[in-house]
Image: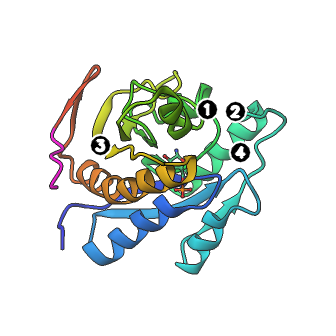
């Protein structure tokens, strides 16, 4: 069991929540020094909320407002109030389908982490596995990175490669990438919580992939 004081995090997600489940289960089974104080979703029916409630972790649907790819101003304030109310120090994005900008990102500058299903800087944005297939690469993977104002442009903390196989479909490749995500993301969140990762501008060090 780790002795560091726990990092108080909120997990934000819009969908299935398999990365959230991997992190929550690693906290419980491997004793990661992480306290998941809140799960927020912009989608009322998102399974991530059900997974959180099943684990007795507070979970809220917070409406995102009128935009499709970001939170509107009123929603940003609501999200911020919920995060502050829960005493959160760090945000873990796990399939949250909106870009964070403005006051929310400023409040948590340098303390928002995301996982993206490609080896960045290749294939940022949506459906990265489909982009990889269409491009014809033989290796893709996943990237854990800090979130800045751009789309999937923040400092890279860790990456894991995944092969693209002959005959892969979008769903078979995405599933293989997600297996890697569920291994890598909890390890990186644990390393962040233990204060092992240093960030200097774009350059980061301190995470060693135990694989
Ligand atoms: C993952 O593939 C992640 O890379 C992307 O969104 C997906 C979320 O999946 N950002 P899940 O909701 O964690 O299952």
Report, in whole angstroms, how far the alpha carbon at label 3 lies from the one at label 1: 25 Å
| Residue 71's disc number | none
Farthest residue in the front direction? 166
Q: Would you name the residue on which mark 3 appears?
A: 161
Which marked residue is nearer to the observer: mark 1 or mark 4? 1
Report, in whole angstroms, how far the alpha carbon at label 3 lies from the one at label 4: 37 Å
Q: Would you name the residue on which mark 1 appears?
A: 99
Q: Which residues are magenta?
A: 206-211
Q: Main secondary structure of the magenta part?
A: loop
Point out the tag, 2 or 3, that comes first from the N-terminus: 2
Label 2 crowd (10 A; few <14 / some 14-19 / many >=20) = some
Where residue 13 appears, as percent x and y from the top left, is: 59, 52
Q: Quadrant of residue 203?
A: top left
Point out the tag, 3 or 1, that comes first from the N-terminus: 1
| Residue 78's disc number | 4
Which marked residue is nearer to the observer: mark 2 or mark 3? 3
Q: Nearer the viewer, residue 107 or 65?
A: 65
Where residue 96 appears, as percent x and y from the top left, is: 59, 46
Q: Quadrant of the N terminus?
A: bottom left
| Residue 70's disc number | 2
Q: Are marks 3 and 4 in contact (CB under 8 Å)?
A: no
115 sits left or right of 52 in the view: left
Q: Is residue 207 magenta?
A: yes
Point out the tag, 2 or 1, that comes first from the N-terminus: 2
């Amino acid at each position: 069991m780790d002795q560091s004081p726990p990092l108080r995090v909120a997990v934000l997600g819009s969908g299935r929540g398999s990365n959230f489940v991997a992190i929550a289960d690693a906290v419980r089974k491997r004793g990661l020094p992480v306290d998941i104080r809140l799960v927020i979703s912009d989608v009322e029916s998102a399974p991530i909320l059900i997974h959180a409630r099943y684990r007795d972790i507070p979970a809220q649907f917070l409406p995102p407002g009128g935009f499709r790819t970001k939170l509107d101003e009123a929603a940003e304030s609501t999200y911020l109030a919920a995060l502050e109310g829960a005493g959160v120090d760090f945000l873990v994005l796990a399939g949250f389908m909106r870009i964070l900008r403005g006051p929310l990102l400023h409040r948590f500058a340098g303390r928002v982490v995301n996982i993206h299903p490609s080896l960045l800087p290749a294939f940022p944005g949506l459906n990265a596995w489909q982009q990889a297939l269409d491009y014809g690469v033989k290796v893709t993977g996943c990237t854990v990175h800090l979130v800045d104002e751009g789309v999937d442009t923040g400092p890279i903390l860790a990456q894991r490669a995944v092969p693209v196989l002959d005959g892969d479909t979008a769903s078979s490749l995405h599933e293989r990438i997600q297996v890697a995500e569920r291994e890598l993301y909890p390890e990186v969140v644990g390393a962040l919580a233990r204060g092992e990762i240093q960030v200097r501008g774009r350059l980061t060090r301190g995470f060693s992939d135990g694989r």
